[in-house]
């Protein structure tokens, strides 16, 4: 593990090793594309099957394997993390119409919710203004009442 291998050229045998490990992420619907006949549900590729697959990989099969590996790792995407950003880039490249439909659906839901919030906000604002006006009116009335009560008392004292 402490040997410096950075100067060595990445060989074809190492490339096969990479594909061996990438095959762990191969989706069931692509088994046939890499030469695997029907397998039982929930079954995985054996090491022997992986060795047989990597022995004669075509460019198309390599692309399938690499993309399935990417898709498997996109499952950790959330919010605005780097993986989510990469997933959006991937989706934009490979399924722009579907991505646009998904975005439009989310934007539609957002707009409806935003509209309801704005309506509730407007109602609350009107209620708050009415409450403030009522409090201000009550305050003015009480001040007027206090002034009328104080005036006769002052007159009584003066007399």
Image (cartoon, rainbow, N blue to C red):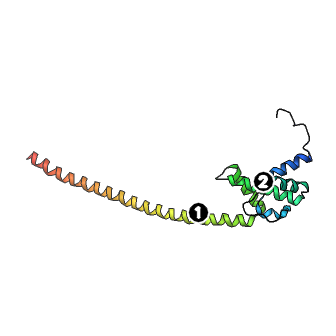
Percent coordinates x, y for residue 82 in the rendering: 70, 49
Instruction: State the residue position of label 2.
Output: 24
User: Are the two marked residues, 2 and 1, in contact with CB atoms closer than 8 angstroms?
Assistant: no
Q: Label 1, on which residue?
A: 110
Q: Give above or below for 135 relative to 108.
A: above
Residue 50 horizontal side relative to residue 157, left or right: right
Mark 2 or 1: in front is 2
Secondary element at image label 2: helix
Residue 101 image offset from top left, x and y in percent: 68, 67
Q: Quadrant of residue 70?
A: bottom right
Q: Answer above or below: position of 145 versus 104.
A: above
Residue 71 position within the rendered picture, expressed as x and y whole percent measured from the top left: 74, 56
Mark 2 Cα-neighbour bin, 10 Å: few <14, some 14–19, many ≥20? some
As drawn, the label of residue 26 is none
Mark 1 Cα shell of 10 Å, populated few (<14), some (14-19), many (≥20): few
At a point 12% along the width and 49% down the height, the residue shown is 155
Q: In which quarter of the view is residue 50 placed? A: bottom right
Relative to 6, 130 lies left or right: left
Residue that appears at 21% across and 55% down = 145
Q: Earlier in the sequence, mark 2 or mark 1?
A: 2
- Residue at 37 percent across and 61 percent down: it is 130
Q: Give the camera-side residue of 45 and 75.
A: 45
């Amino acid at each position: 593990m402490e040997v410096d291998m950075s100067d060595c050229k990445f060989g074809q045998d190492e490339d096969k090793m990479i594909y061996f490990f990438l095959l762990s992420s191969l989706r069931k619907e692509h088994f046939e594309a890499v030469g695997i006949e029907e397998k039982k549900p929930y079954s995985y590729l054996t090491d022997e099957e992986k060795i047989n697959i990597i022995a004669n990989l075509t460019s198309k099969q390599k692309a399938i394997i690499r993309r399935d590996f990417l898709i498997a790792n996109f499952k950790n995407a959330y919010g605005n993390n780097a993986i989510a950003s990469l997933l959006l880039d991937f989706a934009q490249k490979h399924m722009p119409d579907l991505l646009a439909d998904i975005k439009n659906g989310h934007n539609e839901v957002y707009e409806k919710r935003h509209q309801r919030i704005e309506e509730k906000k407007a109602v609350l604002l009107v209620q708050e203004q009415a409450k403030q006006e009522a409090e201000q009116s009550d305050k003015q009335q009480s001040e007027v009442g206090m002034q009328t009560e104080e005036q006769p008392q002052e007159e009584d004292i003066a007399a």
